[in-house]
Amino acid sequence: MTTIAAVRPRRMYGTADDDSSLPPDYTVFGQLDEDSTKTVADIAAKGTDTGAGDGAPKETVAITGVSTK
């Protein structure tokens, strides 16, 4: 018998530097290339919905694809 786990939306977390305060149960699974890093910086520069710097992006962001090497 094969068991299929329910698929639920997941959140992707990252840090802008190596000084991460994420708990140890988060797993780093990749890195961004230079173009992607610029995209993330552009999104961050627009601010957050709370204004405190730790909320959701002020503008809606949709990740439409990823690639791996």
Image (spheres, grey):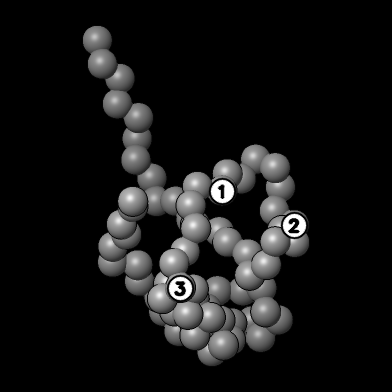
* Residue at x 61% of width, y 45% of height: 26
Q: Nearer the viewer, mark 2 or mark 1?
A: 1
Residue at the far left in the pictured view: 1
> Is residue 34 visible from the viewing direction of this image?
yes
Q: Which residue is mark 2?
A: 21
Amino acid identity at mark 2: Ser
Quadrant of the rendered structure where residue 35 is?
bottom left
What label sits on residue 12 in the rendered view? none
Residue at mark 2 to residue at mark 1: CA–CA distance: 13 Å
Instruction: Name the amino acid type tagged 1.
Output: Val
27 and 58: which is toward the camera: 27
Nearer the camera: disc 2 or disc 3: 3
Residue type marked 3: Glu
> Residue at the location (53% across, 80% down)?
41
Cα–Cα span, label 3 and label 1: 18 Å
Q: Quadrant of residue 21?
A: bottom right
Mark before the other along the chain sequence, 2 or 3:
2
Mark 2 or mark 1: name the one nearer the start of the chain: 2
| Marks 2,3: beta carbons within 8 A | no
Rendering coords of residue 65 (x, y %): 28, 62
Q: Is residue 53 left or right of residue 68?
A: right
Relative depth, front residue between 1 and 25: 25
Q: Residues within 10 Å of mark 2 (few under 14, many from 20)?
A: few
